């Protein structure tokens, strides 16, 4: 009796300790500490745990994370050998796949990522494969300014159904061009940091935006393809994609596509539109007659309304990006220096190019590709469509008819009737 009360007391004490740990960690700036998981929490507050000598949840002999991963993968192998699990041997698990008939397009998925993004990109790959690619087996190109490590390659190539390919970005495509004034660029980063502009003080974010704006489609691996589908870490696909979007793009002469559109943060692009106007004057031959200027501007091109397609999702034509028109456009913007003296994003850069240099019906809105990238969701409007496509998004999260979305303008540009049920989602 006395013994069990003592145990109860210990349990209560342990619980109280847990509550204290939770409050300590959530009141300190835990995001900056990088403490995002329970393991991280235990590790960082490990000293409070009596009886935990290492204060962390590492492998039993203090192995590295990679070794733990490897032995976990190996564990399923030995479980198989001991006949203790009905799962087939590691490496032999195959997803049921109904190979979609028809010819494949000359296309690939493309992901720019760091080694540290491996688990976040794995979530994305898993969803893309489950919802679409397991039936199509398109290639997947991974690009990095650094060398991909073994864990990244092992994990991602286990998840992809097509060929997984890994490319390193050369210094000529990633870094400061020589015409950039380093002191000026550093001053800007400091100012933007003080103004608390997101990624305002980041150098690598700027290299990333410039790379996505002007170079990814010229990487030697990407030169082997005609179409791309860009995938970022931690995205979600909420509905089945039961047809080939690459095929749709090709057969319908589409060059660029989007699922979400919104207004850009003005502070990051104060002079972008001036540069665009300079480009239009210098290269009127590149401006399409039947373009989408009215989607970008409310006064015939004098000012930019900041609408852009959200480029973390894109399915597009690589030949268009490699065209003289796009290269002239990118080179003009690059020379203006705004990737470093401001913080131009690849989203407005791609969007303005597509809106001005393509015919408006060469840009496609993929309503049926339901998508999430923090913090916005595109969930198709209309209940029957969501049921038919086995969607798992909450229609209340749909951003399409929100006041900050530019989709309404898109419908107006194309004189399209709003889909049934949109009022309920405003
Ligand atoms: N190799 C490499 N990839 C990067 C670097 N910075 C960003 N990326 C990748 O570039 C893409 C865009 O970066 P994100 O950090 O997602 O930028 P974002 O989408 O504007 O911001 P988040 O809201 O944080 O997702 C992602 O696929 C990243 O993995 C970098 O320095 N090196
Ligand atoms: C896992 O298995 C592979 C091949 O079967 C072997 O080379 C490797 O050493 C094993 N790793 C561990 C940690 O047991
Ligand atoms: C795919 O497109 C690239 C780029 O245009 C081209 O070089 C390559 O030959 C094409 N491959 C096939 C199989 O058509
Ligand atoms: C312009 O685009 C619209 C639809 O996007 C199309 O109906 C129209 O025919 C096009 N006009 C020309 C001149 O190409
Ligand atoms: Mg992102």
Image (cartoon, rainbow, N blue to C red):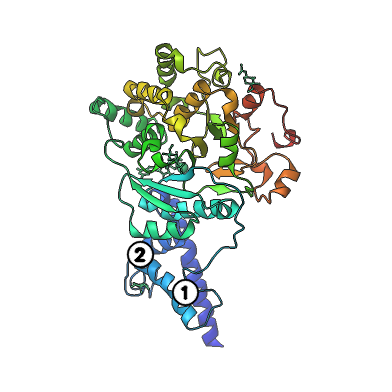
Q: Inspect this view and state whether residue 26 appears.
A: no
Q: Which of marks 2 and 1 is in front?
A: 1
Residue 301, position as x, y percentages in the image: 52, 14
Q: Is mark 2 on a helix, strand or loop?
A: helix
Residue 306, position as x, y percentages in the image: 51, 24
Label annotation for residue 415: none
Q: Camera-side residue: 19 or 298?
A: 298
Q: Which residue is drawn at 43% across and 18% down?
A: 276
- Say which quadrant the C terminus sits in: top right
Residue 9, position as x, y percentages in the image: 51, 77
For disc 1, the neighbor class at 10 Å (few under 14, some 14 to 19, many from 20) is: some
| Mark 2 sits near ligand 2, with its Cβ under 8 Å away | no
Residue 380, position as x, y percentages in the image: 67, 41
| Mark 1 sits near ligand 2, with its Cβ under 8 Å away | no
Residue 164 lies, with reference to residue 64, above or below; the image says: above
Q: Name the residue under label 2.
A: 66
């Amino acid at each position: 009796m006395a013994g069990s009360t003592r145990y109860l007391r210990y349990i209560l004490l342990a619980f109280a300790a847990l509550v204290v740990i939770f409050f300590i960690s959530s009141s300190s700036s835990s995001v900056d500490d990088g403490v995002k998981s329970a393991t991280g929490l235990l590790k960082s507050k490990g000293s409070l745990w009596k009886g935990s000598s290492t204060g962390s949840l590492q492998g039993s002999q203090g192995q590295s994370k990679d070794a733990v991963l490897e032995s976990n993968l190996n564990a399923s192998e030995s479980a198989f050998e001991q006949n203790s699990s009905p799962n087939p041997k590691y490496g032999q698990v195959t997803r049921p796949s109904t190979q979609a008939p028809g010819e494949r397009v000359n296309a690939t998925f493309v992901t720019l990522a760091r080694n540290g993004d491996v688990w976040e990109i794995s979530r994305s790959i898993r969803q893309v494969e489950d919802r679409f690619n397991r039936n199509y087996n398109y290639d997947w190109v991974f690009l990095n300014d650094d060398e991909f490590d073994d864990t990244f390659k092992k994990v991602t190539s286990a998840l992809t159904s097509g060929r997984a390919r890994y490319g390193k970005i050369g210094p000529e495509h990633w870094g400061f061009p020589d015409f950039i004034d380093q002191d000026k660029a550093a001053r800007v980063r400091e100012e933007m940091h003080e103004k608390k502009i997101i990624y305002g003080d980041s150098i690598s974010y700027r290299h990333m935006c410039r790379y996505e704006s002007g170079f990814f489609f010229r990487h030697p691996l990407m030169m082997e393809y005609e179409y791309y589908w860009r995938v970022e870490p931690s995205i979600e696909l909420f509905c089945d994609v039961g047809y080939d979007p690459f095929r749709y793009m090709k057969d319908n002469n589409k060059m660029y596509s989007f699922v979400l559109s919104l207004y850009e943060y003005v502070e990051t692009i104060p002079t972008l539109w001036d540069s665009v106007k300079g480009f239009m004057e210098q290269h009127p031959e590149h401006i399409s007659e039947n373009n989408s200027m009215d989607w970008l501007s409310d006064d015939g091109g004098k000012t930019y309304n900041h609408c852009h397609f959200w480029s973390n999702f894109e399915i597009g034509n690589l030949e268009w990006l490699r065209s003289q028109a796009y290269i002239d456009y990118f080179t003009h913007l690059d020379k203006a220096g705004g990737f470093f003296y401001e913080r131009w994003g690849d989203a407005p850069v791609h969007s303005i190019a597509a809106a001005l240099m393509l015919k408006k019906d060469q840009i496609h809105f993929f309503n049926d590709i339901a998508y999430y990238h923090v913090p916005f969701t595109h969930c198709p409007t209309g209940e029957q469509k969501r049921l038919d496509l086995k969607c798992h998004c909450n229609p209340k999260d749909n951003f399409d008819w929100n006041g900050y979305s530019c989709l309404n303008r898109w419908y107006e540009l194309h004189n399209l009737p709003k889909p049934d049920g949109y009022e309920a989602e405003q």
